């Protein structure tokens, strides 16, 4: 008697094809440091949105009778020379940082994407030559000198600092996008679009730029951090924020105070800045790792 | 054997270098004389740097400070007498004034020489003569020089304005400005000008030799050639190094005539200079250190600059008491100190030409704007401004006649410098202002930490008054020059300024509100009140006296009543200097005129 199995071996389940994005999300979710840094960034974002909504940070400009008070239950980080609450000012500055970071990151990423895509698509032709020349010129000027010069030249305009930063930050994004576009240009889907007679600008906007999103995302996060740091430096130099308050202005205010042993302004602004920049850098690294198909996680 | 020569050379070079370095210090400057005795070096510090050392451009205190030490003026101030009192400098005596007050005759001292300079034949400085003074004043009216000091004599000296209009030909005589001989100057005025003598003590009237102007042209701005007590040896944006002018007239100091009071000045060792001819130091170095913290660190290191005023943020650490001002023992043991109310004031003006706060042809708008300005005056706390930015030791006073001038009236009501927020809010409401209708106002300031904090304080008061925070906007400028340009082109509604007196006469601050001095003149508020202007004209030709003082005070009250400015405060400055320095520092009025009297105790003398 031949023994037979009552059950037949089930066919192996067909492996679901995973998209780049779902893989990236999975990788990111498994990255504990990445998740922790995202959480910190979200907390900051929450603080900024709260200031926007008028939930907190509303007393950043209120004068009180206490001068350079030490930390207390009433004033968590003490008060400055004008009796203004340093914690309130640090909280309000989060909004300033996000405002500048987001505006500069979005605009310079868009500009970099468009310029990089045009440059890469027409590589070796005159639009590429012009864009490369422009990038070369901008990159040859020391960064902070250029940003300070533009901010100085546009003094009096509310967005002079934003313009200065966007004018500088787009070049790196454009360079990376250009390289990617040159690579993508040889792919079949682009050749197919050509063969079908799709206009070049449509190929760039519909088929090429969307395929550089992973670069743009990472670049946007890097630009966001750079913008915040640059704002702090420009505000410290007196070329930055004019009508609100920012961590840079707080650090600038502290220059006269630290010689008398009062560090509250300096410590509060530096701590807020340090944590956000660290968290955003780690978030940016984690995002880069997650979007890199060559890296396993 | 072959290597021996280079080794000897190397050793010799090292020895030379070591010897040189041993004799040097302080940025490579020698510290000993040829005979090995130590040089007397005084290192002064200033909080800003001059940009132009030509007397026609010496509009700011930093320039004036150096100009007064490199160029001669006919008159100067007594070293120690306070209130300030003029004395003859290059002039032999106070001017001989005609009965109608229109003709001034001034005799010059003989034997005062310009520095040795290649501008002169054989490089030897010649004697200063009356023609040099005439030439120097004419330079202000030469359009090519774009003088910043011509306003002092504009429309006041017979024929000088016409000389300018006729092409500024130096060969042409001016009727009201003549050298009667080598040592006599005659000035004829269009109308009485009692302040004329004060102007002849200012850096603007520094005497420049024509040879130097012809040789150096615009380079004169960095290469002074004068007959003052010092000769410029080196000048950069960070430092000026001066050495004595060996052609300077030998005039022994009469300490009693300079106002010496043993009770006030006895501790400073000034008796040591009595009867000796200045300058006393072998080298005068002036460090221009704009950063307060750096200047303070340099001073307190005890090895670098020998003078500093006490920065506001250090006041609490240095003072044992603010009223009266006394130093903590650890500081008084280390340094000499002196303090006094500045000859000037700080104020915040409202720009009357701007629609937001200014005057209007429409009577209703005009009244409403005035009510708004007056409410802002009531809402502003000078006590808080003093406490936070002037260590609480500033002298708050109503109006624009400062406490150091004789016309000051301590009985002037203090309502305009006393905060009354309830009255301010009520006045605003009564005039029909609401947060929605209040105008957006722009506050101009230099982009420094302190100025920004002052703006924030101003905004804080205005927000308490009822302004939405986004309606009080700051407009910052990187440099004072840019800010000043903003003032002169009416870029903002409100601006904070300081004014240092050119001479101890209330006219010097009242002219800040005289209609014809409208921007780009000195009337930054663009205040125009026909009654005020008429009184100003009336007093301009009056000699000092009770009648003129009475009119000055009426004018002061007009500025207060029309709410033209938040005003004012005279700062109290505390000066510290090292104990090996013999001197009494002062930066008021013209600043710098006292440096020729500074002496330094060398190591042996200490």
Image (spheres, rainbow, N blue to C red):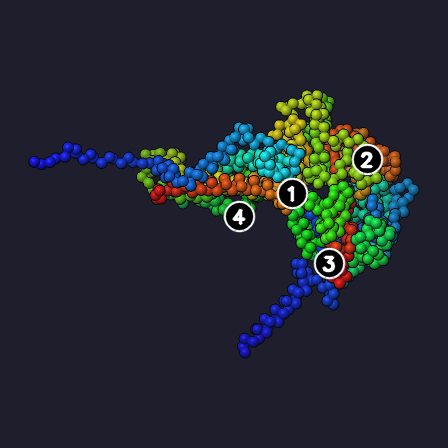
Q: Is B199 on the left or on the right of A217, as rendered?
A: right
**Mark 1 or 2, which is nearer the eye?**
2
Alpha carbon distance from label 2 to label 4? 57 Å
Front position in the image: B451 or B237: B451
**Mark 3 or 2, which is nearer the eye?**
2
Q: Residue drawn at (81%, 38%), measured in percent from left and top?
A: B506
Q: Give the residue at mark 2.
A: B410
Does B584 sit above or below residue B34? above
- Check contact, mark 1 vs mark 3: CB within 8 A: no
Question: Dot 4, crowdedness within 10 Å: few (<14), some or many (≥20)?
Answer: few
Q: Residue B492: x, y in percent?
A: 66, 34
Q: Quadrant of the C terminus of chain B?
A: bottom right
Name the secondary structure under disc 3: strand
Question: Dot 1, crowdedness within 10 Å: few (<14), some or many (≥20)?
Answer: few
Number of marks present in the image shown? 4
Q: Give the residue at mark 1.
A: B479
Judged from this view, the residue extending furthest toward the front is: A73
Q: Residue B588: x, y in percent?
A: 77, 45
Query: Is the same chain shared between marks 1 and 2?
Result: yes
Does A9 sit above or below residue B248? above
- Check contact, mark 2 vs mark 4: CB within 8 A: no
Q: Give the residue at mark 4.
A: A142
Question: Dot 2, crowdedness within 10 Å: few (<14), some or many (≥20)?
Answer: few
Q: Residue drawn at (89%, 45%), measured in percent from left and top?
A: B97
Q: Is B526 on the left or on the right of A268, as rendered?
A: right
Label 4 marks which chain's residue? A
């Amino acid at each position: 008697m031949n023994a037979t199995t009552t059950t037949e071996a089930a066919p192996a389940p067909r492996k679901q094809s995973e998209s780049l994005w779902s893989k990236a999300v999975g990788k990111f979710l498994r990255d504990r440091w990445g998740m922790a840094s995202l959480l910190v960034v979200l907390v900051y974002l929450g603080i900024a949105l709260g200031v926007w909504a008028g939930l907190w940070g509303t007393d950043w400009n209120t004068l009180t009778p206490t001068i350079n008070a030490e930390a207390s239950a009433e004033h968590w980080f003490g008060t400055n020379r004008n009796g203004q609450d340093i914690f309130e000012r640090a909280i309000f500055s989060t909004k300033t940082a996000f405002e500048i970071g987001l505006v500069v990151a979005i605009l310079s990423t868009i500009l970099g994407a468009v310029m990089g895509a045009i440059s890469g698509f027409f590589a070796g032709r005159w639009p590429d030559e012009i864009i490369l020349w422009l990038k070369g010129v901008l990159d040859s000027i020391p960064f902070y000198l250029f940003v300070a010069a533009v901010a100085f030249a546009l003094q009096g305009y509310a967005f002079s600092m934003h313009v200065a930063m966007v004018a500088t930050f787009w070049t790196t994004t454009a360079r990376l996008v250009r390289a990617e576009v040159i690579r993508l240009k040889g792919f079949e889907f682009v050749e197919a679009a050509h063969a079908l007679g799709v206009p070049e600008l449509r190929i760039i906007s519909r088929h090429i730029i969307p395929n550089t999103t992973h670069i743009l995302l990472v670049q946007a996060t890097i630009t966001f951090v750079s913008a915040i740091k640059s704002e702090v430096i420009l505000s410290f130099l007196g070329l930055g924020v004019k009508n609100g308050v920012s961590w840079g202005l707080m650090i600038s205010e502290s220059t006269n105070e630290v010689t008398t042993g009062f560090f509250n302004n300096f410590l509060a602004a530096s701590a807020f800045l340090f944590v956000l920049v660290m968290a955003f850098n780690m978030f940016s690294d984690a995002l880069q790792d997650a979007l890199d198909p060559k890296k396993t996680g | 054997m072959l290597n021996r020569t280079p080794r000897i050379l190397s050793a010799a070079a090292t020895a030379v270098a070591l010897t040189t370095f041993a004799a040097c210090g302080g940025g490579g400057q020698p510290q000993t004389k040829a005979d090995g005795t130590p040089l007397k070096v005084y290192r002064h510090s200033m909080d800003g740097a001059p940009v132009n050392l030509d007397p026609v451009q010496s509009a700011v205190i930093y320039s004036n400070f150096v100009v007064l030490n490199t160029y001669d003026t006919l008159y100067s101030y007594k070293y120690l007498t306070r209130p300030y009192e003029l004395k003859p400098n290059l002039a032999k005596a106070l001017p001989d004034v005609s009965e109608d007050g229109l003709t001034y005759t001034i005799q010059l001292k003989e034997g005062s020489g310009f520095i040795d300079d290649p501008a002169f034949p054989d490089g030897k400085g010649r004697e200063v003569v009356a023609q040099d003074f005439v030439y120097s004043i004419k330079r202000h009216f030469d359009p090519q020089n774009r003088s910043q000091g011509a306003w002092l004599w504009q429309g006041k000296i017979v024929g000088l304005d016409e000389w300018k209009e006729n092409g500024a030909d130096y060969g042409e005589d001016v009727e009201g400005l003549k050298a009667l001989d080598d040592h006599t100057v005659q000035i004829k005025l269009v109308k009485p000008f009692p302040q004329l003598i004060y102007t002849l003590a200012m850096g603007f009237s520094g005497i420049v030799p024509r040879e130097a102007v012809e040789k150096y042209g615009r380079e004169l701005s960095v290469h002074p050639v004068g007959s003052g007590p010092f000769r410029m040896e080196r000048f950069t944006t960070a430092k000026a190094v001066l050495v004595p002018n060996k052609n300077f007239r030998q005039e022994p100091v009469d300490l009693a005539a300079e106002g010496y009071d043993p009770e006030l000045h006895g501790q400073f060792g000034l008796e040591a200079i009595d009867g000796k001819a200045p300058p006393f130091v072998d080298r005068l170095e002036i460090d221009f250190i704009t950063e307060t913290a750096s200047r303070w660190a340099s001073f307190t290191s005890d090895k670098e600059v020998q003078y500093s005023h006490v920065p506001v943020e250090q006041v609490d650490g240095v003072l044992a008491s603010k009223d009266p001002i006394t130093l903590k023992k650890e500081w008084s043991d280390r340094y000499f100190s002196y303090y006094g109310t500045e000859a000037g004031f700080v104020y915040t003006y409202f720009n009357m030409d701007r629609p937001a706060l200014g005057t209007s042809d429409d009577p209703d708008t005009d009244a409403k704007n005035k009510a708004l300005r007056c409410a802002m005056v009531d809402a502003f706390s000078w006590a808080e401004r003093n406490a936070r930015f002037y260590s609480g030791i500033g002298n708050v006073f109503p109006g624009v006649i400062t406490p150091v001038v004789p016309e000051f009236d301590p009985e002037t009501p203090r309502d305009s410098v006393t905060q009354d927020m309830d009255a301010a809010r009520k006045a605003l409401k009564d005039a029909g202002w609401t947060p929605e209708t209040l105008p957006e106002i722009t506050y101009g300031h230099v982009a420094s930490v302190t100025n920004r904090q002052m703006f924030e304080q101003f905004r804080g008061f205005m927000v308490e008054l009822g302004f939405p925070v986004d309606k009080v906007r700051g407009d910052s400028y990187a440099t004072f020059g840019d800010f000043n340009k903003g003032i002169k082109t009416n870029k903002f509604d409100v601006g904070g300024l300081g004014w240092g007196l050119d001479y101890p006469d209330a006219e010097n601050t009242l002219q800040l509100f005289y209609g014809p001095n409208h921007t780009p003149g000195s009337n930054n508020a663009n205040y125009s009140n026909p009654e005020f202007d008429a009184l100003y004209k009336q007093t301009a030709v009056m000699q000092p006296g009770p009648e003129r003082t009475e009119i000055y005070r009426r004018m002061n009250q007009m500025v207060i009543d029309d709410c033209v400015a938040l005003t004012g405060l005279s700062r109290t400055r505390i000066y510290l200097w090292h104990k090996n320095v013999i001197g009494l520092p002062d930066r008021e009025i013209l600043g710098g005129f006292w440096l020729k009297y500074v002496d330094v105790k060398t190591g042996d003398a200490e």
